[in-house]
Amino acid sequence: MQNLDKTKCFTCGSSCASCSAESVCASCSSTGYYLNGAGCSSCASGTKLAPDGKTCVTCPSECAQCDLDGKCLSCSSSSRYLVNGVCTYCSGSVTADGTGCVDCDYSCGKCSNDGKCATCDSSSDYVLNGECKSCGSGLQATSDFTSCVSCNIGNCNQCDDSGKCISCYYGSQVPSADGKACVTPIPSCTSYNADSTCAACGNGLKLSSDGKYCVTCDVENCATCSTNDVCATCAQGYFLSKTKQCTATIADCVTQGATGCTECAGDMKPSLSGGQCVTCEIDNCDKCSADDECGQCGGGLSTTTAKDACVTPFPFCATLLANGTCTACKTGWSFSEDGTRCVICDVTNCDKCSDDHFCSKCGFLRTPSKDGSTCVYTVTNCEEYDNTGCTKCSGDLVPSKDRQSCVTCNVGHCEVCSFNNLCSSCKDNRVVSTNGDVCLDMTNPISGCGSYNADGTCASCTYAGTSKKPSSDGKSCVTCSDFSCSTCSADDVCDTCLFSGTYVDGTGNCVSCSGGKKLSPNGKSCFDCPTGCATCSDNGICASCTSSSQKLTSAKDGCEDCPTGSLQSAGSDQCVTCGVTNCNKCSESDFCAVCSGSYVPSADGKACVTSIPSCTSYNADGTCATCGNGLVPSYDGKFCITCNVANCAGCYTNDMCKTCDQDYFLTQTKQCTATVEDCVTQEGAVCTECVQGKKPNQLGDLCFACAMSGCAACSEDNKCETCTTGVLSSDKKACVKEITSCTAYNSDGTCSSCSAGSPSTDGMSCVTCPDNNCVSCSEDNTCDGCQGTYQLSKDHTSCQTFVSGCAEYNNTGCASCSGDKVLSAGLLTKCVSCNVDNCDKCSGENVCYTCKEGYSTIGNGAACTKTIDNCFSYTDDGLCSLCNTPLLGESSATLKVSLDGKSCISCEVDGCDKCSSTDYCGQCDAGLTVSADGKTCAACAIKDCQSCENLDKCYACLNGFSATVDKTHCVTSVQNCAEHTLDGCSRCSTGFRKVNGECVPNSAPPTEKKRDNGAPWWAWLILGLGLAVIVAVVVVVAVCLYRRRAAAAAAAAAAPYGGEEAAKGKGKEGGNEPADDNSQDTP
């Protein structure tokens, strides 16, 4: 970046606008950044840059900017306004100065403090006296909404104040550089011309000669290319040679200047661009644009339109012939009265104009108006014209309504008559009837009547403060204030109703039927109608059904369902199968009479289409065929529009026709005429000869300027349609000599496309090409250049699809990429960034698909390692994991991975996985063990051994087994055992001790020895406790028995009668029976 005085360049931070020293910012480039020491810093979240741009202040989110105290200076939302440093929400509209909130019309964008519009919500409205008014079709408001500018550019969404398009409706289109068109984007094109061609390319590409592509151009110093190595125009200071290369020197040039050659050798002359010397035998020609075609004359002379001669200049002549005569002036110019010069004339289509802009003679088939201000179409039998057409015809003829013809009119006293013999205006102070068939003598007109029927009765009344309508007899206008009434018999006495379905009731009001009743056919009463009927006759007979899926019963006393898949016929009395979507009534299987909803039938009845306002008949594709209300279909048939072009069947705009009525022809100004403009000889509807300098097109309905040699008819000015000799060039600007097998020609006569093969390098023949996309080929069957964006392979034998960033192509596509990019993997080859060193093709930034020569992928493409000869697969650290298997017919020696994994070596030891040398194995295949001398791999003889050492020592047993200390046996493993013997574990691991042949943690409690019966100690403990409880119970019972007997004995000894007597006596006294002796033993 430059320093402040632009004398040095410094390394500068990305957010700096300028630097005062290396890495020292002087100013910041981005909004929201401020100087902070040597660099630029951005404000933290919740803060914003202060107005002085030197610090950040706390600022509410609804504020766009705050002062140093944190008060709002402006609001971030259009729905908020500023009041005392606070952004307040506005439910109406914010004023234009952003300081208030007012109620404002919905059409306003912003309003002034008094509630008037300051801006408009729509870009197609402008402000007038505080209100938003429509600019009209094709116009758009200026940025200040004070006026409108034209923005009638196809697909343009927005224009600037100068009328240039700055954005287009469709994302697939962009504005041209001049803002006059919306064009389709071209890959790598950076700006466009209004004709949709590219004006400048990016990405190092050049313009194609036709401006339709951005292409790779291998021609040095070339500005635009026809193909990769064929230049169309050279850069400034370089010149295009005949071999389509750019050179600093010009062949056959004697005197060469900065702008090109000024003098050529021999009879040759400089080309118009000065870049070549060409053969030119035209007298007084200084520079030729091509062989025998003059581009610039000398001696003050001018080239003719056909560039075939140098003649005396005729300023502003459009068609200048070799004999020096002018046959047509340029647009906006006309011949003077004497025909010797072209003068400015404001009158369109004028051939001769006086200096005061009065036209005295118009172009072919046109006549000046009476005041000379307009050239109108010539009308047969017309005697006088104004600027709209014929105003007076000869004899008994009268002008037609459009004033474009004189017609016979059977309506007496008619002044202007239409083609269908109806009068549109009368003379002699008479009034034309509503249907135009009578000119009425209204000496005593009906007061208040605006139009009359043919019988002189009033058809409609004028309004003069009250609602006036014709009386029932039509002889007066009476007050009829009920808007639903059509005519009144007297003031406010309704006689007939305006709307269908209503009638005049007994009170003189227009009412509709109620209670399910229907209006009678005579419209004077209501009567009952069967359910499901849409209409009925006076006697209650059903005439049509409401539902399209029903038809009338045979007795016509109601409606019945149609079979599934069929509909009511147009006559309502049958059911027909209908194949028309959205149809309610079909008269035939493929002809719809009534559609459902808002759909309407097409004219052929084969479709139900969406209704278009004012359209009276439709095509089956949904476009409008004819319109009513004086409108015509738009050019695409989607609208009915006003068309001011006479005899036009469909209009582009109000005053530009697309297709004319039958027997009328479209002019170049998009008008319709009964004769072909500028035609001299017309046979019926076809022009066979035009004025000098012009030729008819192939259809014979237009004449165009057509000065190309050998051209029979032109499709537009100087674009040939058919040739009399030779064939037509692709740009239609020349008729050239035919070349065998050539299907498309350039205007210089060279071939651009062949049916068999491709054009040769010089374009003068078709040769066999190795690829269909070759633009031109050499005799040795090699391609010289490719079409469009296709790229030439290095050996010139094929054209490959363009790949961005590709440096070189081979016969399969891109072979190598430029810079640090590599080819992508997959079907669609691209040049992509790749972070894997030594990678040739990447499938992602960090995943390599194939490595460069001498390298192989490892880690699923994570890296490229140096290739090991004969290695088939690699470990993630770049060592070989598997070597290649010899192919049939190759050496039978088996390749094995070396012990260090860095090579593949021949190994003759059967069953070896890794060899140290040809006859020494370092590691055998799984299940085998290498012998002590390394020459044998064999299965281990020790039972349950997985890997042996020297065949007689096991160093790894099968799962669940462990090797004994001497490695001679595999025994059942003891958990946590450090050394095993044939008798079991001999030593436990650290932290464990041996208990009953097992290794238990040192912290585990001591355990009892196992009983002989093998029961665990806790079982014995439970058994002992159980026996102890039983013994205790027995002891307690015995003690109780003893004490009871002792007590009984003591009592007996103390009684006065002795023991037995006392006992007996006691028993008697108590009244109890003697107890059983056994009861004494119960405790």
Image: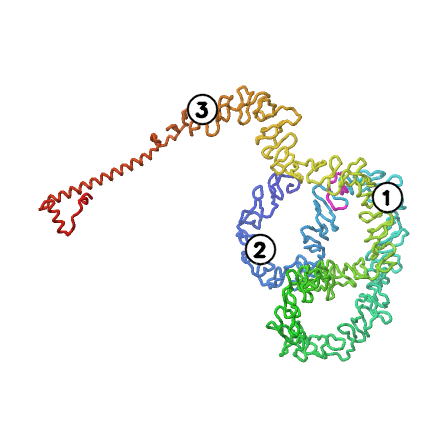
Q: Is residue 202 above or below residue 115?
A: above
Q: Is residue 286 visible?
A: yes
Quarter of the image where one finds residue 880: top right
Which mark's residue is nearer the viewer, 3 or 2? 3
| Residue 589: % across, % down | 70, 61
Disc ID at residue 556: none
Q: How is the image coloured?
A: rainbow
| Lateral position of residue 464 relative to residue 664, left or right | left
Q: Name the amino acid type tagged 1.
A: Asp
The residue labelled by disc 2 is: 77
Q: Position of residue 539 (x, y in %)?
A: 65, 75
Q: Amino acid at mark 3?
A: Thr
Q: Which residue is mark 1?
A: 291
Q: Earlier in the sequence, mark 3 or mark 2?
A: 2
Task: Read off the magenta span.
Answer: 210-227
**Residue 942, position as x, y percentages in the image:** 49, 24
Depth check: give the residue in front, 1018 or 523: 1018
- Which residue is located at x 30 percent, y 36 percent? 1023
Which residue does the numbered mark 3 point to in the structure image? 964
Mark 3, Cα crowd under 10 Å, few <14 / some 14-19 / many 20+, is many
Task: Please name whichever residue, 927 or 244, is drawn nearer the observer in this view of the structure.
Answer: 927
Mark 2: few, some, or many residues within 10 Å (few <14, many ≥20)? few
